[in-house]
Each structure stands twice: as structure tokens, then as C-alpha cells.
Image: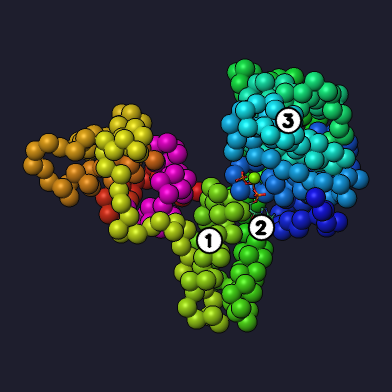
Amino acid sequence: MASSATPPSLVGQAASFLQLMEHVSRAAPLNRPTLVIGERGTGKELVAARLHYLSSRWDKPFIKLNCAALSETLLETELFGHEQGAFTGAAKRHVGRFELADGGTLFLDEIATSSASVQEKILRVVEYGEFERVGGTQTVSVDVRVVGATNADLPKMASAGKFRADLLDRLSFDVVTIPPLRARADDIPMLVDHFGIAMARELGRPFFPGFAPKAMSQLLAYPWPGNIRELKNVVERAVYRAQGAERPIDEVVFDPFDSPFRPVAMPGDRRAGPAPAEEAEAEATPATPTAPGPATAAPSGPCNFLEQVADFEKALLRAALERNQFHQKRAAADLGLNYHQFRGYLRKYELLDRRSAAE
Ligand SMILES: Nc1ncnc2c1ncn2[C@@H]1O[C@H](COP(=O)(O)OP(=O)(O)OP(=O)(O)O)[C@@H](O)[C@H]1O
Ligand SMILES: [Mg+2]
């Protein structure tokens, strides 16, 4: 597997981001396992690659495996390989990721999802550099640095018996935690330019005109639950949808599913899990008087369609506000709405009360 000498470039200038970069540079040369923790889309894979390319292993393989993508048995054979005839269909010996990564780094993404028996085998490789291929008796020795990533709370999982505490002890020699984008909003303008310029270039546009002030303030105010991946998508979408290539972009679409024709999961729709109305009722507190609860199943007799829909929407809005301690931006994100859409609904239903805060 060919490796390039260049560590992947990460864009950012916020104090917490610079501290993170400093931490990564210090941890990289150490020949020890490392954990990378962060919400979805924060750049865990980029950080893991940087740990590899800034280490003395940079010219050896950097191998990745997403533990969540495979069943327990497949994960085991992918990690450790199998011998010929190990099971029906194992026509040839299969070399696993630990062997492929020999001398280099193995990045185990979503490591929290691996089973206890796989965790036990990983522990042995981390500790002694040894394992047996599935169906084999010969011990294979490798020199691999393991970098694990997750957005789960591993210490909590370990105390609940859902992750092996002894593996956590070994892997957590050092833990690099990536701050979510909302905790480093100073980075937003720089990232917007970075992704905007790249997109304009990809589209063959002469330059990236930037965002108009109102659009920029929307980008700055949004809580970015999907972090940098979401910001990249929002910026790229805005650039490609922009009509006049020279004028600053004034339209930002946070939710590409947003449409007046979007199919609505009806109360009682089993695909949608628990009926949102039930959830809303369960969340409501006596402090927030609620309108008569919306029906939890499609009414069997005649009913007022518009009233039912309005009641349902109000219950969703109230429950989201309750869940987020009346923080409107978070409640909006919870519902997959942008802040302006959410405020529009509050206004429509006269729910703009004094307890709701934007910040
Ligand atoms: N600081 C950064 N500068 C530039 N691009 C970044 C930065 N951080 C992340 N990205 C980009 O954001 C996207 C998501 O990054 P990455 O896949 O590393 O996140 P992740 O934390 O592994 O996400 P997930 O939890 O969903 O697996 C990628 O396109 C990556 O290139
Ligand atoms: Mg990832």
C-alpha cells in the first residue's frame, strides 16, 4: 500500500484547534496506541492519518478498518485473516489488516462497536504483537501501532461492562479529543473559504465570490450537529446552486430534504419508531401547558385535518424546546430545521414565549 509523505492538511485557527494540532504532533512520534474521540464529522480519520504521517512509520502502510461496517465473524477475519479451509468457502489464505499494517499504523474506526471476543484478540496484539489467523495454529508476530476512533463514551461503556476495561487501559495511553465545530466557531469563516474555493475550482468557476453578510451570519449561528462534514456539504451545495457566479452567495440551504412536498411520517407509522406525538407527550412537563394532544393513530372517523396537523406540529415544537431547555438553536437542530424555519413555526403558533433563548 503506497504511502505519501504529506500529512493531510487540516484547516483551522481557533485556539482549541491549534491545541489539538499541537497534541497530535506530540503524540504522533510515540510508539503507543492512541484514541481519537470526537463527534461525527469532526475529522477523526484525518487526525488518525496525521498521527501516522507525522510518526517514524510514515513510509509504512496506513491501514483503515471500520469496525461498525462488519459482522463479528467478518470483522475477525478482516482483522486477523484466515487460513485456507478455515470455514466453508475459505478457498485461500486471507491476509488480515494487522498483517497488512505491519510496520505501520492500523486505524480502527468505530472501535466501540467491536464484540468482546474481537476486543480480547486486539488486546493481545496491542500487548504482545501476536495473534493467530482464524482457523490457524501458527502465531503471527507484527509490529503495528493501533489508533482507535469513536464518538462513544468508552469509560462509561467500560464501567457498564460494554467495552473491555483492560483494552481501554491499553488503548488510552493517550486520548486526543477533537472539539466539535460549535465549540470553535472562529474556524467557520476559514473552513467556508477552504471548501468554497475548492468547489468553485471543481466547477470550473473563475473564483469563489464568498457569502453575503446575512448568509455568513446564518453559517456562523448554525450549531453544526454534523460538524465539518456537514459544513462542507452546506458550502458546496450553496456554491453549486448559486446563480450569478460573481455575486456573493446569499442563499444557504442547511437541510437538503427541506421541501413543502417532503413526505411526513404519520402518527402511528411504524417505520418512524415511537410515534413522535407520544414522545412529545411524555416529554411535556406541567410547567408547559399543552394543547389537546394530537392523535397517536390516524383517527378512524371524520376529523379536522388542518387542526390535527397543527396540533401535531405544536407538540413536536414544544417537546424539542423542553428537551433543549428552551434553547431555540438546539431545539431547531433537533428537529432538523434551521433556526429561521424554527422561528417561523414558533411565530406561526404563537409559541415565542420569554423562556426560549437563542443562545
Ligand atoms: N480541520 C479540517 N480541515 C479540513 N477538512 C476537514 C477538517 N476536519 C474534517 N475535515 C473534512 O470533513 C470530513 C469529515 O472528516 P472525517 O471523515 O475525518 O470525520 P470523522 O470524525 O471520521 O467522521 P465520522 O464520525 O462520521 O466517521 C472529511 O471530508 C474531511 O476531509
Ligand atoms: Mg470517520
Query: In which image quadrant can residue 104 be found?
Result: top right
Image marks 3 and 2: residues in contact by CB distance under 8 Å: no
Q: Who is closer to the viewer here, 165 or 105?
A: 105
Residue interval drawn in magenta: 321-345
- The residue carrying mark 1 is 234
Give the labeled residue for mark 2.
Answer: 187
Looking at marks 3 and 2 on the same chain, the residue that comes earlier in the sequence is marked by 3
Q: Nearer the observer, disc 3 or disc 2?
A: 3
Prevailing secondary structure of the magenta residues: helix
Q: Residue at x 34, y 44 (%)?
A: 317
Asked if one can make out residue 256 in the rendered structure from this viewpoint, the answer is yes
Q: Residues within 10 Å of mark 1 (few under 14, many from 20)?
A: many
329 lies left or right of 53: left
Report which residue position mark 3 lands on.
84
Give the left or right position of residue 115, taking residue 334 as reference. Answer: right
Which circle, 1 or 3, is nearer the viewer? 3
Amino acid identity at mark 2: Asp
243 lies left or right of 102: left
Asked if the residue at tag 1 contacts the one at tag 2, i.e. Cβ–Cβ closer than 8 Å, the answer is no
Task: Assess whether residue 247 is covered by the magenta stretch.
Answer: no
